[in-house]
Image (tube, rainbow, N blue to C red):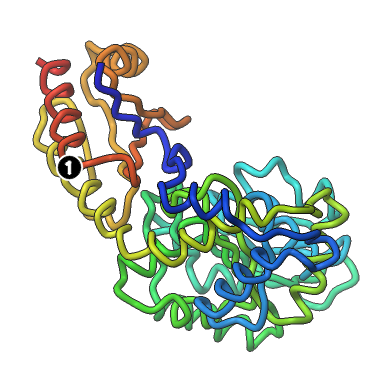
Amino acid sequence: MRVVDLRSDTLTCPTPAMSRAMAEADVGDDVFGEDPTINRLEALAADRLGKEAALFVASGTMGNLVSLLAHCGRGEEIILGSLSHTFFFEQGGSAAVGGIHPRTVPNQPDGTLPLPEIEAAIRVDNVHFPQTRLIVLENTHNLCSGYPLDIDYMRAVGDIARCHDLKIHVDGARFFNAAVALGVAPDKLAAEADSISFCLSKGLAAPVGSVVCGRLDFIAGAHRARKVVGGGMRQAGVLAAAGIVALSEMVERLADDHANARKLAQGLAEMPGLSVDLSQIKTNIVFFELTRADMPLDQLIKMLDDEGVRMLTVGDGRIRAVTHYHITAEDIDYTLGVFSRMLK
C-alpha cells in the first residue's frame, strides 16, 4: 500500500549524502570543544544567520530552553504568543527549570503579536512585578498555519525591544522555510534577533538536532545552560555531519514543499465538506476543517489511514498536513484522490 505520511516534517529521514557524511565524519569530544565536525556546523550556521557564534543542541525544545536560560534569571519575565510552541508544547520548561515567568499575548492568525499589546505587556519598574527581559517570537508559526514573519514586522518588534532595553529570541524551528517563502536572505530575516534557534531535523531532513545562534557572550551562557540540562555531547560529529549537508543542500528545495502544500490546499478547498483558508498557506503547513455533520473527524482520519494517508488532528478540531522532503507532487495527487473517494 502506498503511504503518504503528512503528520509532520519531523518524519524526514537522512538523504544519501547525509548518510555518507555521517559515516565518514571526523569526530572528537565536543564537551572539550574538540569535535571538528560540530565546530564546522556551528561556524556555518552562524555565518548563514549573520551571528557571531552558534551552538549545536539535541532538539528545538532544548535550543529554546537554553536560550531563555541564557537571557533571563529566576523571577524574570518573557513575553510570548499564546499559541507559541515555547508556551504550548515545551512542558513549561522555562518556568520549571529556570523560574522564568511567561506573559502571553494573543497570536494573530498570521502568527504575529500585535505591537501595541507587546508594548502593553512590558512591565513598569515596580517592586510588585517581575522584570521583563525578553520577547519571544516564532518564525514560521506552527499553530498559525506555518505563517512566516516578514522583515518589516521583525524590525517593528526590534524597535520596541531597543526602546525598552529588551532582547528578542526567535524560535525558528522552520526558519529557513520562512526565508525561502519570503524570498529573503536568512541573515537579513534574523537581523533583529539577539538569539535564534532552528531545527535541522524538520524540512532540512537531518536526523537529529537544532542550532542556536547569537552573540559570543550569549552563546557562552547558552553553552553553560546546555550542560546543566544534560545536553553536553561527546563524539556527536556524526550528527553534525548531516546538519552540514542539510544547510548546504536542503534549503532551497524547501520551495518544493511549499508548492506541494499549496497544491494540496487548493485541491482540498474545492471539495464539499472541507474548509481551507488559502490565504494562510504560505509554507509547508496546511490546516483545514471537516464541515460535514454526518462524518465524525476521527472516522475520516481512520478512513484516510486505511488508504495510507496519514494526518494529525489538533485540539480545536482542525486537521494538519505537513509537506516535506519525502512528499512528491504525485503523493499530493494520490492524497486528493483518496479524499475525493472518502467524501462522496
Residue at x 50% of width, y 77% of height: 48
- Name the foreground residue: 85 vs 213: 213
Q: What quarter of the picture does the C terminus occupy?
A: top left
Q: Is residue 134 above or below residue 277?
A: below
Outermost residue toward the front in this view: 24
- Residue 162 quadrant: bottom right
Q: Is residue 162 above or below residue 287?
A: below
Residue at x 12% of width, y 25% of height: 337
- Residue 319 quadrant: top left
- Name the foreground residue: 73 vs 190: 190
Total numbered labels? 1
Can the viewer see residue 184 in this picture? yes
- Residue 275 quadrant: top left
Residue at x 36% of width, y 36% of height: 320
User: Left of 73 or right of it: where is 77?
Assistant: left
Mark 1 sits on what residue?
Answer: 329
Label 1: how many residues lie within 10 Å, few (<14), some (14-19) or many (20+)?
Answer: some
Q: What quarter of the picture does the N terminus occupy?
A: top left
**Amino acid under label 1?**
Ala
User: Left of 255 or right of it: where is 339?
Assistant: left
- Residue 120 point in image, percent of width and height: 61, 71
| Element marked by disc 1 | helix
- Residue 148 point in image, percent of width and height: 38, 63
Residue at x 41% of width, y 47% of height: 16
Can the viewer see residue 106 in this picture? no
- Residue 70 point in image, percent of width and height: 79, 68
Q: In this view, does 61 lie above or below 157?
A: above
- Residue 143 point in image, percent of width and height: 45, 46
